[in-house]
Image: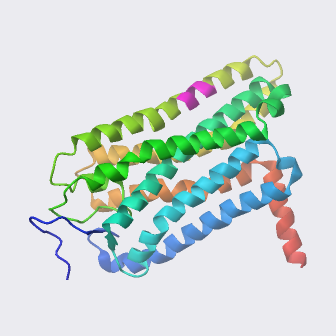
Amino acid sequence: MMHLNASHTDHHSFILTGIPGMQDKNPWMAFPLGFLYTLTLLGNGTILAVVKVEQSLHEPMYYFLCILALTDVSLSMSTLPTMLSIFWFNAPEIPFDACITQMFFIHGFGVVESGVLVSMAFDRFVAIRDPLRYASILTHGVIGKIGLVVLTRAVCVVFPVPFLIKRLPFCHSNVLSHSYCLHQDAMRLACASTSVNSLYGLIVVILTLGLDALIILFSYVLILKTVLAIASRAERLKALNTCLSHICAVLLFYVPLIGVTMVHRFGKHLSPVVHMLMANIYLLLPPVLNPIVYSVKTKQIRRRIIQLMIIRKIH
């Protein structure tokens, strides 16, 4: 049996947590988790396939949607190995280096998703503010450069995190509070000062997620100002309707994120089960619901999916 509390030696692995205090119930979580991961792959895969085959969807808005779908799948796949090992195979131990690697990808794709949502806000602003030049402004080259900038930013800001964690000694409990590795979760187990880690984490959150949220908010202020200047009420509603899916995607990302932050910050008295649920909702819910939102709100995507379903039934 592995000793969970060592006094003077660094740990070579961490123990991940399934359902706190109810480890015997872990197998029951395997089925809903498997269902959610299946929905994520199916939903985002459908979005990618529909945009590829439907010529009318070869527009900047839907290219950004494809980037969002790829990011959602990547984020989900980052948590999948440890989720499966805990809930399917009852194997909660993860090697130290594997934990750091997972940490890098989870935080990295989280920053990428935030950047993609900013890009989509810019896309909606250009489409409403200058519709005649929309396609000429957001060319394939520009979209590719935006995607590269978003990815490069994420890699640059998250790259120091593994090294900041690796320099810390871990000589107390090695039990993490989630079923995947997060920087703030591993940091609290260190038996040395974590002020550098805390400061860097705060700076990253402010300059990425915080700044992105402000940019999105400012974009919608400009969009609203532009929409209100449109004379026709029908045109105003049509313009706003093109933003609804993106607004839903923003809420699906930031509301759980704020919830997790508030629970970590002020909910220390809450049950560990609440912490587990909030952390899993933050990472699992947006990838599942984003394809559903865009399928319901986007007529072209909805129509193409229905056509594909009818063709399958005929064959």
Residue shown at 72% from the left, 36% from the top: 142
Q: Quadrant of the C terminus?
A: bottom right
Does the magenta-highlighted stretch encompass residue 295? no
Q: Looking at the image, which is closer to me, 179 or 200?
A: 200
Instruction: Give the residues drawn in magenta, as a range.
Output: 215-220
Please identify the quarter of the rendering in which residue 182 is found: bottom left
Residue shown at 86% from the left, 76% from the top: 313
Give x and y (percent) for residue 305. Answer: 80, 61
| Total count of labels | 0
One can see residue 314 in this view:
yes
Q: Quadrant of the N terminus?
A: bottom left
Position of residue 38 in the picture relative to residue 198 (left or right): right
Give x and y (percent) for residue 288. Answer: 59, 59
Residue shown at 36% from the left, 35% from the top: 203
One can see residue 179 in this view:
no
Does the magenta-highlighted stretch encompass residue 217? yes
Q: How is the image coloured?
A: rainbow
Give x and y (percent) for residue 95. Answer: 32, 70
Please identify the quarter of the rendering in which residue 17 is found: bottom left
Give x and y (percent) for residue 206. Answer: 41, 33
